[in-house]
Image: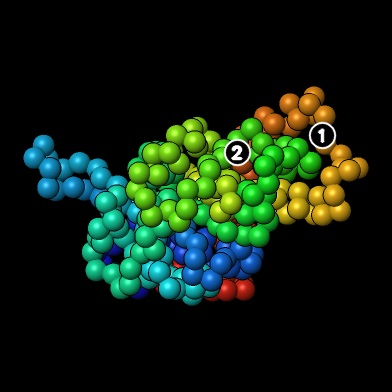
Amino acid sequence: MPDPSISSAEWQIRKDLAALYRLVALFGWDDTIFTHISARVAAKDSLTEAGASEVDHFLINPYGVFFEEMTASALIKVDLDGNMVGQSEGFVNPAGFTIHSALHAACRDAHFVIHLHTDAMTGVSAQKEGLLPLTQNALLLGPHLAYHDYEGVALDHDERQRIVDDLGDKKIMLLRNHGALAYGSSAGEAFTLIYFLEQACRQQIAALSAGRDGVLFATPDVQDKVAPLGGGVGFVSGLLWPGLLRRLQRQWPGWDS
C-alpha cells in the first residue's frame, strides 16, 4: 500500500515511472545501475510569501537499485536544487540529477524523461554524421532529433542550460559519445520515442557493419514525405502503453507496489 501522505495522482505517476524502469530492463536497455528515468510531480510550496504556488519536484531511482527491482514506493523525490523531499532511503546519482533536473526545469511537457546508454544509441552518438536516413524509423525521428556534445561526466550544473539550448523544441537527443535521452508528456510517449530511437540506431549499426559502400540512403523527397508522420508518436503511444503494461504484468509483476 502507498504511503498515506502520497496523493493518488502522485501514486499513479510513481507506478508509471516504476513500470518504465521495469520495461527498460525487460527490453535489455538498462546499464546495471548507471542510467536513470524520472517523472515530474507537482507540490504546493507553502514557504512563499505570496501564498501557495506550484513548484516542481521529480521522482528518480535510488542509486544502486537495479531497474528490474524498481517499485513505485522505492522512488526518491527531490526538488530542482537536489534536496530530498520527504523520507526516502538511498541517494540520487549526481549525474542523473544534472541531466534530469535540466529538462524538468525548462521543458513544461517533460513529465517523463528517459536517459540510456545502450550500445546502439551510444554507438551512433559517436558517429560524426549521427543518425542517417537509412530506415523508416530514422526518417520518422530525424527532424525531431537534437545533439549535445560530450562535456565529461555530467556533474557540472552549468551544463544544464547547454543541454536545454541544444535540445530546443525537440524531445529526443543523442548525447555525443555518451548515450541518448527522450522525454514525453506521458510515460507511454517517452517510452515510444526511446524505442523508435533504439530501433533506428540498431538498424544503422547493422546496415553499416559491412561498410558504407552499397548502403542505400532514402532520397530527399521520401525523407520529406515520411518526416511529418513522426509527429504522431503521441497517438501511437496511447495504443502501445496499455499493451506494455499487460506484458509487464505477465512477465515481471510487482512494479506497482
At label 1, counting other C-alpha atoms closer than 10 Å, the crowd grade (few under 14, some 14-19, many 20 or more) is some
Residue labelled with disc 1: 218
Residue 91 lies left or right of residue 164; in this view the side is: left
Quarter of the image for residue 55 reads top left
Q: Residue type at mark 1?
A: Ala
Work out whether residue 190 can be spotted: no
SS state under label 2: strand
Q: Which mark is residue 145?
A: 2
SS state under label 1: loop
Is 58 placed above or below 232 here? below
Instruction: Give the mark nearer the N terminus: 2 vs 1.
Output: 2
* Label pair 2/1, CB-CB below 8 angstroms: no
Q: Nearer the viewer, residue 162 or 55?
A: 162
- Name the residue rendered at 43%, 53% in the picture: 154
Residue 18 lies left or right of residue 92; in this view the side is: right
- Name the residue rendered at 57%, 47% in the picture: 176
Q: Most extreme residue toward the front, as rendered?
A: 152
Q: Most extreme residue toward the right, as rendered?
A: 214
Q: Nearer the viewer, residue 243 or 158?
A: 158
Q: Which mark is residue 11?
A: none
| x, y percent for residue 87 | 24, 68
Q: Nearer the viewer, residue 137 or 71?
A: 137
Quarter of the C terminus within the rendering: bottom left
Work out whether residue 69 can be spotted: yes
| x, y percent for residue 95 | 41, 57
Quarter of the N terminus within the rendering: bottom left
